[in-house]
């Protein structure tokens, strides 16, 4: 037993040593360095972001430039993140979604950003900043990180483009494609599609509209044999397992770049446009360095590296232009560009009562 | 009468083996995939292993997992052994009370224990992190150690320790030379269970850890969205290490026995 443990330790330490050297040999372009300790009185920050949502080299670059340490943590959903914060964990920078930021502002969990430190917003896409007003009026608390929409990804060889463009979300109820579709397994996105297909607002509290959406979903469920999935949909569509799927634009951009038969469509009936933004919680230990981190992640270099690594749409116009230009990574990739003129597109708002009611109904839809 | 060949049972055995090992082979296989997909193999490549070693979060998660598992195993084995020996000598009421308390964390679902720990730490205003996670691991490992030692102690002849002391042992010596060697099997079993419980714990770790500290399971969980084969590479390395250790553990005694046998042979030849 003793030998055994000693051996495991030795093996792991040696593998780790290899990893560390591999890490340090990688150099990143250094610009002028600032000593965080001297400048801000602290030199480490805790950052909490969704999983697989960053180019990790950017964290090393920030650490080098500010002579600081970043403790980088990831969460699987906004709700997990929220529970952790309630449990008393202290983070300096968090990157949640719009509706969660709205909730955190209303519960007084965030502190205003120091706008003097935020020098990058001038280069932001005006549509992103306009959209921010929906969850953070005047942009006091947040700086956007990525943004996107929800739409349909379909296989051009299995599904007719004409049907998709003519029927919009209702193509998900077209029995021609029975057994050939992925439906997104979340009450938020699931109901969004039904509300939009029926021409309602996705933030409606009208009981008749909710019932109508529920019936729409029931009918879809009973006639279409949908496969309910979340992130498995990415692999599924890359391999053309089914013909049509509801997807987030960033994931769709990846699918389109991997499989040329795939196409992207945002129905005219409207969709959900969203953004994930950087915020500083009230109990942050090093808020000034946190502001610097946010500004760093909003810079041209960081936005470009992150968008290249992850596939989600940059919030900066210059990066977005470059990525979609002729030699860019997402040239002629429809899903990368977010629709800016959709008059029926909406931002999701936090509504505790509605969330609960829809969640119960969503379970009922799937049980049948 | 000749026995019939148990065809059905051997088929069943193969199905069981496939059930156990196919997922592992699948994970290892796709860790060598060239593309990002987990279900479509496009070519051989070791780039995900490189990516894994370059990923600081993964490296730190491994370090956290291993150090916590080792420390938690050491502490809980010592504490558990002492408690078990103490319990075997105490009054029935005390023993029953400790046994019941000991069973609680094992009967409770993990999530209840986890939230209990989280509320406990936050109500005492202890900020969560490495130390709180370690304390929680020690706490949930101790019951398993006690549970695996208790049956051995029960089978122990109570007169043995007394006899040892009659023959001049101090109580300490009686414990070290008489009791511990007889319950060694239980202690090792308890330590192994504690190590594996701690190594792959997820729920309790998630709720007791703080900023910047995550173990392998927390890391994997928070990256299930948009999975890529680095996770496979990580799991595959754990599989390699475990396989290697198992081979060592089984082969070394075999070699040792062979050598001993040879020595014996040469000795007898000389005579």
Image (cartoon, rainbow, N blue to C red):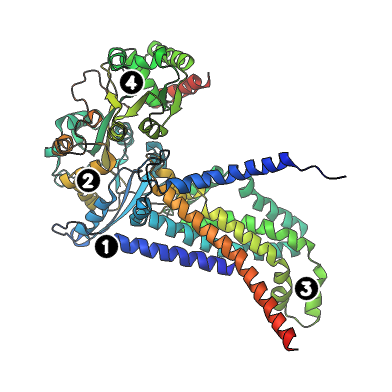
On the picture, is A9 further left or further right than A213? Answer: right
Residue B141, can we see it? yes
Q: Badge 1 local density, few (<14 within 10 Å), some, or many (20+)?
A: few
Instruction: Name the residue that disc number 1 marks.
Output: A25
On the picture, is A74 further left or further right than A265? Answer: right
Instruction: Name the residue that disc number 4 marks.
Output: A203
Task: Please tell me whether mark 3 or mark 2 is closer to you in this view.
Answer: 2
Residue A350, can we see it? no
Residue at the left extreme, as displayed: A122
- Identify the residue at horizontal 71%, vertical 71% (top origin): B181
Instruction: Name the residue that disc number 3 marks.
Output: B161
**How far across and how far down the image is residue A203, in percent?**
33, 21
Sequence-wise, the earlier of marks 2 and 4 is 4
C-alpha separation, residue under disc 3 versus residue under disc 4: 75 Å
Task: Please tell me whether mark 1 or mark 4 is closer to you in this view.
Answer: 1
C-alpha separation, residue under disc 3 versus residue under disc 2: 69 Å
Q: Badge 4 local density, few (<14 within 10 Å), some, or many (20+)?
A: some
C-alpha separation, residue under disc 1 versus residue under disc 4: 50 Å
The verdict on a common chain for dots 1 and 4 is yes
Residue A272 is marked as none
In depth, the one of A192 and A107 nearer the eye is A192
Instruction: Name the residue that disc number 2 marks.
Output: A305
Sequence-wise, the earlier of marks 1 and 2 is 1
Give the structural element (helix, strand or loop) at label 4.
loop
Which chain is disc 3 placed on? B
In depth, the one of A274 and B127 nearer the eye is A274
The verdict on a common chain for dots 3 and 2 is no
C-alpha separation, residue under disc 3 versus residue under disc 1: 60 Å
């Amino acid at each position: 037993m003793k030998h055994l443990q000693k051996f495991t330790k030795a093996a792991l330490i040696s593998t780790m040593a290899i990893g560390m050297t591999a890490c340090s040999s990688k150099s990143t372009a250094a610009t002028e360095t600032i000593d965080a300790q001297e400048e801000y009185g602290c030199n480490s920050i805790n950052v909490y972001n969704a999983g697989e949502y960053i180019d990790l080299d950017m964290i090393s670059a920030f650490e080098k430039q500010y002579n600081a340490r970043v403790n980088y943590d990831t969460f699987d959903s906004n709700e997990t993140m929220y529970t952790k914060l309630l449990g008393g964990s202290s983070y300096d920078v968090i990157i949640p979604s719009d509706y969660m930021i709205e909730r955190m502002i209303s519960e007084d969990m965030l502190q205003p950003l120091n706008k003097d430190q935020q020098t990058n917003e001038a280069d932001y896409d005006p549509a992103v900043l306009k959209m921010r007003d929906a969850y953070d009026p005047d942009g006091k608390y947040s700086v956007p990180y990525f943004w996107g929409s929800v739409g349909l990804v379909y296989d051009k060889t299995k599904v007719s483009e004409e049907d998709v463009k003519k029927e919009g979300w209702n193509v998900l109820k077209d029995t021609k494609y029975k057994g050939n579709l992925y439906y997104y397994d979340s009450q938020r996105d699931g109901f969004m599609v039904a509300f939009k297909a029926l021409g309602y607002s996705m933030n409606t509290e009208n009981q008749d509209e909710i019932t109508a959406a529920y019936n729409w979903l029931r009918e879809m469920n009973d006639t279409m044999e949908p496969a309910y999935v979340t992130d498995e949909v990415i692999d599924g569509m890359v391999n053309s397992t089914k013909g049509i799927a509801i997807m987030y634009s960033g994931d769709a951009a990846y699918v389109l770049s991997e499989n040329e038969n795939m196409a992207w469509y945002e129905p005219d009936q409207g969709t959900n446009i969203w953004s994930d933004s950087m915020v500083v919680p009230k109990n942050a230990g090093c808020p000034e360095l946190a502001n610097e981190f946010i500004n760093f992640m909003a810079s041209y270099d960081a936005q470009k590296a992150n968008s290249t690594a992850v596939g989600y749409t940059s919030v900066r116009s210059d990066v977005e232009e470059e990525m979609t230009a002729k030699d860019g990574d997402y040239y002629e990739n429809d899903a990368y560009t977010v629709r800016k003129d959709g008059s029926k597109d909406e931002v999701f708002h936090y509504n505790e009562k509605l969330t609960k009611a829809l969640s119960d109904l969503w379970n009922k839809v799937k049980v049948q | 009468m000749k026995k019939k060949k148990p065809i059905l049972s051997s088929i069943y055995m193969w199905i069981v083996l496939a059930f156990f090992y196919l997922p592992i082979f699948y994970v290892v296989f796709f860790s060598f995939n060239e593309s990002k997909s987990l279900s479509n193999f496009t070519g051989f490549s070791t780039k995900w292993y490189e990516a894994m070693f370059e990923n600081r979060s993964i490296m730190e998660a491994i370090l956290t997992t291993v150090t916590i598992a080792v420390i938690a195993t050491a502490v809980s084995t010592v504490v558990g052994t002492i408690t078990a020996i103490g319990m075997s000598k105490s009054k029935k009421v005390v023993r029953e009370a400790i046994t019941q308390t000991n069973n609680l964390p094992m009967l409770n679902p993990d999530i209840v224990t986890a939230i209990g720990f989280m509320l406990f730490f936050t109500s005492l205003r202890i900020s969560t992190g490495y130390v709180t996670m370690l304390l929680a691991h020690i706490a949930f490992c101790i019951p398993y150690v006690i549970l695996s030692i208790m049956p051995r102690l029960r089978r122990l002849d109570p007169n043995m320790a007394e006899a040892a002391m009659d023959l001049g042992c101090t109580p300490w010596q009686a414990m070290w030379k008489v009791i511990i060697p007889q319950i060694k099997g239980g202690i090792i079993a308890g330590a192994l269970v504690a190590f594996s419980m701690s190594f792959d714990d997820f729920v309790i770790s998630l709720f007791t850890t703080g900023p910047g500290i995550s173990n392998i399971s927390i890391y994997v969980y928070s990256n299930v969205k948009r999975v890529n084969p680095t996770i496979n590479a990580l799991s595959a390395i754990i599989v390699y290490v475990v396989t290697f250790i198992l081979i060592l553990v089984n082969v070394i005694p075999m070699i040792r026995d062979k050598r001993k046998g040879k020595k014996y042979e040469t000795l007898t030849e000389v005579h």
